[in-house]
Image (cartoon, rainbow, N blue to C red):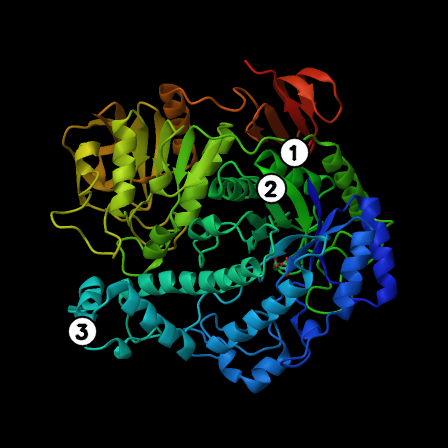
Amino acid sequence: MYYGGDYNPEQWPEEVWHDDVARMREAGVNIVTLAVFSWSRIQPAEGVFDFDWLDRIIDLLHEGGIGVDLATATASPPPWMHERYPEILPVTRDGVTLSPGGRQHYAPSSPVYRRLAAELVTAMVERYKDHPAVQMWHLNNEYACHVHADYSDNARDAFRAWLEDRYGTVEALNAAWGTSFWSQRYSSFDQVLPPRIAPASSNPCQMLDFRRFTNDALLQCALMEKEIIRSAGATQPITTNFMGAWPAVDYSAWAPHLDVVSDDAYPDPNDPQSFRAAAFQRDLMRSLKPRTPWLLMEQSSNALNWRPSNAPKAPGQMEALSAQCVGRGADGILFFQWRQSKAGSEKFHSAMLPHAGTGTRTWREIVRLGGMLDSLPTLEPGSPAQVALVFDWENWWALDNPDHPQNRLDYLAVIMRWHAALQRAHIQVDIVPPEKVGGEHRLAIAPLLYLMRDEGAAALEGFVEAGGTLLTGPFSDIVDSRDHFLDGGFLQRLGTMLGITLEDFGALVPRDADEPGEREARVEGAFGDAVGELFAEEIWLDGAEAVATFSSGRRLGNPAVTRAQAGKGSAWYMATVLDDDGCDSLVRHLAETTGVEPVLPDAPSTVDASRRGDVVTLVNFGEDDAVVAVSGTNLITGVEVERMTLAPYEFAFVEQARP
Ligand code: GLA
């Protein structure tokens, strides 16, 4: 188990470094992420490098037995760069040039930024590739954290080249973007721009391609750094820190390029349900690289500084969230940051070693967590799940575009609602794009798959054909990968298998909106009653049976949930977005009928349960004691258990005998 955090020694006089290493040893720290924001210190002027201080701290850490996750330091360009090359700065959709003075002020497509970043990474890797302390390389930092997309002239030129590469001819581009609409036909790639702010909605195909381009431009930056590291002969694993389901970057396309997936997660201590969103994020990380442990690269030891109100974590909450990560596949717990800063934007952000020193609850918890992690045996990577929850970035981007029947859809919130229902039922789940459904999966839940690639549709069909159960809808199988309708209506790929046709989307006014209109559609069905939101679609049975019907509103009496036998499996469709109760009852019903086994058959819903091989991790995130029937060996105490009572934020790792 890795244990440590971001370490920024350049913020401190060297005499503090010795205390840092001593305290790190006391806390059980075995790795620190170094040099994330050190560019201006490493390279004070173009062509001038100062590595002496970095040599000294890396040696000091090594003497103390502490490894280094060495960052490439390219995340915050130094002042000399924009002074000499102002064209590296990114530009917003509204045309505002983002100034330096914060961080991440670079245009990813800027050839100058890339050249200078490459020079820095080359110098870093040449110097440190053989240093025994260096255990990992950390590319940049949180790509697209602040700049979700750059609309500068650098981006314009690179976008044109990207389009030419993708489409070959301007005729093909015109066809893909449907430019006959609103007189948008291009006669040359040189006329194309990023979707900068325009008088009316920008072309949705252009917007979608710009999201793809932005993702690719950032990935190219990462791959450039990776290539430099590998061609210099460095053999350590390479990672970069993800940020959960981050809208700007399609991590499912990034993960195959990395040796280790790592994640930064900051659940809000003010939200008693934030452990559910956290569980979603952990499962996403586990699923991005199956059978490979991931790292929690950053979390906070206590309060943050960047939310409107920054509550402290409750006693034990940080350790409980750390245990949740381990249970859901993490082999390391790291923090932002090691020692709390004395100045700068993040001086109020908690750290492993607080400003108030070692006589604090935070420090005691940090030391205790280090000891606990050190006592754990090696765990298998996360177990493959029997349930797949389909989450797809391209679909998210397409749904995000304006001018849809329902323009107040929060795709991520809907996906997380299904994940929370699975979590309440203690069912382990993989979070995957449609193409990755299959294998061990018995049940696949694919809500709101508006943009469906042909490959994704084929995978879902093949899954059902082979005996799987698919639950999809509403607003699914509407457009192809270009964001075009298919000829013949909606559900053109899955409709036959689902045994229904879709005539109208029946948008509803969101439940919390202050305006007239129908807001919910009651649903009555074999699996229980529920309330539908956002859509009450007009669907017609064409081979399927209605499992639930609408019992209120304009679709009264019409099918709301349907089921059809197809191949060896079955295909379900929902004509609305079900509320929590609806998701809970449908999950229960489908788990029973498909034989999906929960991690624990019977435990309070506030207990987070996950499995790694024979080891079940339990964390009580409820406000009361939770009694859980679980038999095995408690890995922390060594005691055999049959039943456990977990206090709030108490956790346990229980090794079960193989059946
Ligand atoms: C991000 C960054 C860190 C730090 C933290 C604060 O995760 O990577 O440098 O700013 O946020 O929460």
Whole-percent x and y of residue 567? 22, 25
The alpha-carbon separation of the residues under discs 1 and 2 comes to 9 Å
Quarter of the image where ligand 1 sits: bottom right
Which numbered disc flags the more N-terminal residue, 3 or 1? Answer: 3
Q: Extreme bottom residue here?
A: 84
Identify the residue at horizontal 42%, vertical 43% (top origin): 415
Q: Are marks 1 and 2 in contact (CB under 8 Å)?
A: yes
**Quadrant in the picture for the N terminus:** top right
In the foreground, 93 or 431: 431
Pointer 2: residues within 10 angstroms few (<14), some, or many (20+)?
few
Which numbered disc flags the more N-terminal residue, 1 or 2? Answer: 2
Say which residue label 3 marks. 185
For residue 499, say whether it is visible. yes
Whole-percent x and y of residue 115? 52, 74
In the foreground, 658 or 346: 658
Q: Are marks 3 and 1 in contact (CB under 8 Å)?
A: no
Circle 2 sits in a helix, a strand or a loop, which is it? loop
